[in-house]
Image (spheres, grey):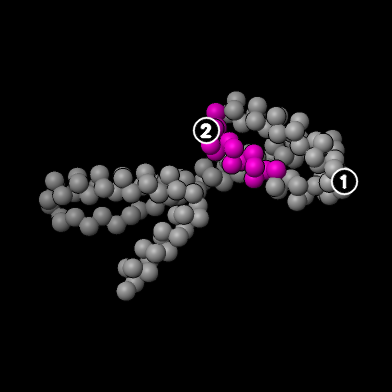
Amino acid sequence: MGDRMMFEDEWPRIERYLRDVLARRRIPRDELEDVVQDTALRLFRAWDRVRPETAASFALTISLNLVRDDARRRTRRENMPLPVEAPQGDIEQEALARIELARVRMALDRMNESQRSVLLAEVGEATAT
């Protein structure tokens, strides 16, 4: 394609298509917004290499890959063991530690990737000293 003006002409149509497809896949609205914005940026960067007849399918591939990558990151985070420091044999303390761990995981899930990175870096520095 190569023409940046053509991107501006084509993007509204592609954006509507992506929103329809992602909504049918039941992507949460806030995640959908992030995926569409990230897709626009990536498509714009690759615009010189995209043929007009494949622009919408190329954008959809980008979007679905972003959704899959996010799902993989969440799965890895959920399966990442966090240390639970509760005395062995004290059932009440173990239950409280599990509740606290669930709260920490929920808080981490609400953060975006950069917030999580900063927090984990701070925690790493605090535990190293």
Q: Does residue 19 sit above or below 50 in this rendering?
A: above
Along the viewing direction, whichever of 4 and 61 lies nearer the viewer: 4
Dominant SS of magenta comes to: helix
Left or right: where 66 falls relative to 75: right
Q: Amino acid at mark 1?
A: Asp
Q: Report the side of 18 relative to 121 (left or right).
A: right
Which span of residues is magenta-colored? Answer: 26-40
- Residue at image coords 22%, 57%: 85
- Residue under numbered circle 1: 3
Categorize mark 2 by other alpha carbons within 10 Å: few (<14), some (14-19), many (20+): few
* Magenta stretch contains residue 36: yes
Callout 2: helix, strand or loop? loop
Viewer-nearest residue: 29 or 78 = 29
The residue sitting at the bottom extreme is: 129
Residue that label 2 marks = 28
Q: Is residue 14 above or below residue 5?
A: above
Q: Quadrant of the C terminus?
A: bottom left
Foreground disc of the pair 2, 1? 1
Q: Is residue 126 above or below residue 58?
A: below
How would you rate the neighbour count of disc 1 (Cα within 10 Å): few for under 14, some for 14-19, many for 20 or more?
few
Q: Quadrant of residue 39?
A: top right
Residue at 64% of width from left, 39% of height from top? 36
Q: At 69% across and 37% down in the image, what residue appears? A: 60
Q: Is residue 37 magenta?
A: yes
